Image (tube, rainbow, N blue to C red):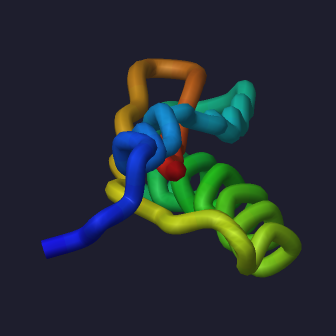
Amino acid sequence: MSSASSPPPLPRPVKYAHFEATKNGLHTAAFDRDRIEQARQQALEWINNNPQLEIISIDSSFGKMLAIVTVWYK
């Protein structure tokens, strides 16, 4: 049991960063793979440049012309 007179600090709020890749051209599986890989590479570079952050989750999504990788962190 702690005898501290102040409450514990609040946890850091959850934030996010997202990385996008677009590409025009014929819609194929390779086309989708290239876009998601470009967005992932951007996210990895950002993560590696911010080692002080606690990564909570990483998710990916894409549509016809856009791929997005979202990094949730504290």
Q: Toward the viewer: 69 or 27? A: 69
Query: Does residue 2 lie above or below 28 as drawn?
Result: below
Q: Residue at x 48, y 59 (%)?
A: 33
Residue 61: x percent and y percent? Answer: 36, 35
Q: On the picture, is 42 further left or further right than 56?
A: right
Say if residue 32 shows up in the picture.
Answer: yes
**Residue visible at 36% across and 42% down?**
7
> Residue at point 40% right, 48% down?
5
In the image, 49 versus 1, the foreground residue is: 1
Q: Quadrant of the N terminus?
A: bottom left
Residue 57 falls left or right of residue 6: left
State the image coordinates of residue 29 (x, y, percent, origin top left): 38, 53
* Picture residue at 46% right of the left edge, 46% below the top: 9
Say which quarter of the image contains residue 56: bottom left
Q: Residue 60: in sight, yes or no?
A: no
Horizontal side of 39 relative to 36 (left or right) equals right
Compare residues 8 and 45 and report the one nearer the observer: 8
Q: Position of residue 27 (x, y in %)?
A: 48, 33
Furthest residue toward right: 49
Relative image position of residue 2 (x, y in whole percent): 24, 70
Query: Which residue is the extreme one toward the left?
Result: 1
